[in-house]
Amino acid sequence: MPRLLRRESYRADGPHILDNKNFDFTSEVPPDYKCPLCHNLLRDPIQLISCGHRFCNSCYLKNLGRYGLNRHCPIDRKEFKESEVFQDRAWRNTIMSLRVRCKFKSCPWTGTLNSLLEDHVEECEFEDVKCPDPNCNIVMARSRLENHQKNECQWRVVVCDYCEDKYAVCKEEVHKATCRGVPEKCINGCLTRDIPRGQMKKHVENECPLTILPCQYRHVGCDDEIRRHQMKAHLDQNLQKHLDHACGKIRDMGADLREKTFQLNQHSEKLALLATEQARNMTGNGTLMWAIDNFEIRFRQAVNGIEPILQSEPALTGPYGYKFRSLVYLNGDAKAKGNHVDNILIAKSPLMYATNK
Ligand SMILES: [Zn+2]
Ligand SMILES: [Zn+2]
Ligand SMILES: [Zn+2]
Ligand SMILES: [Zn+2]
Ligand SMILES: [Zn+2]
Ligand SMILES: [Zn+2]
Ligand SMILES: [Zn+2]
């Protein structure tokens, strides 16, 4: 039997369903319904047949001791046998049918202890519940929860009227500080009202009549700066001035153009000369014309070993013929050094210069 009692659904050491104290009795509880050991309402009562005393199952097990040695009734010290202990389910049912009222003061509910535990605690409108938002710590009667979530909770999410972004009510200031839709007055002080903050730059750049702009004729020399709404008047009033600026500019540009054209022509002539020279070299007729300028200076340099060899521009033996150059040792070479001018011809086949060009 004690083993059976240990297996009772209410564990001796765990919290008991009656611990929650979700109720008050509507009238005084008769002493028979209380445990003489813990003085609380009997929990899962057992009864000793020999003397009729009842105890909570958990109080009985504690009194029995670790090895179940103490088999004397704690009230009258009468000895009892294991077979003389039983779970008093009838007594439990009687206790569960005692009338109670809900512990929440504003709740009008009354009923049996059993129906309170089975049904009412789950659905009592007056039970304190925490706001389900993890950031919100407000506790309120369940009946107020809906209104709280809809209208009061500081963490409820709302949509911004100006930009349609979402934010928690308590973060409104943070949002409004950065919201690009908040209407503002023009920073230039024009009369346009309610400009969304994100559109201010566009307004100032493209629309605002008070924005200061450079004169449209600044490229021809008008340095005036005018508010947008006064631009037309400025243009009307300064027609002659702008015309004079434009004329001066055209004059300057004409002079500049002539100078540039002159320079361009000079370059073209030089290019043409170079091209002719090159063509003569490439379509040669076997003649190499080579005038050595500053001969005396070069000769002296050769004697002194500064530049002993001079090399001519290449020439061709004929159209698509061999390419050749002349090398001149102005102070002679090898045995002839100091006595003769040595002139050496070097040639490349058409194939070679075609690839080595
Ligand atoms: Zn007890
Ligand atoms: Zn007893
Ligand atoms: Zn209630
Ligand atoms: Zn809340
Ligand atoms: Zn916004
Ligand atoms: Zn403006
Ligand atoms: Zn101007």
Image (cartoon, helix red, strand yellow):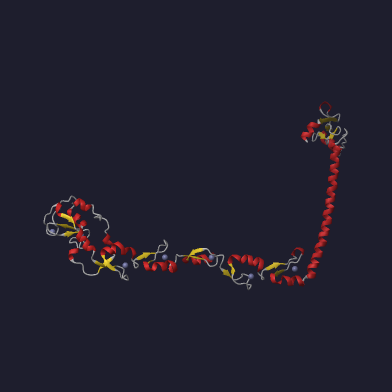
Q: Is residue 60 left or right of residue 246?
A: left
Q: Is residue 54 in view from this perspective?
A: yes
Q: Position of residue 301 (x, y in %)?
A: 82, 36
Q: Position of residue 322 (x, y in %)?
A: 83, 31
For image coordinates 76% across by 72% down, the residue present is 236
Please say if 276 is above or below 236.
above
Q: Is residue 120 left or right of residue 183?
A: left
Residue lying furthest bottom in this view? 191
Q: Quadrant of ligand 7?
A: bottom right
Quadrant housing the C terminus: top right
Q: Nearer the viewer, residue 338 or 55?
A: 55
Q: Is residue 104 left or right of residue 352?
A: left
Q: Is residue 250 left or right of residue 65?
A: right
Please say if 78 is above or below 199.
above
For image coordinates 66% across by 66% down, the residue present is 206
Q: Position of residue 170 (x, y in %)?
A: 46, 66
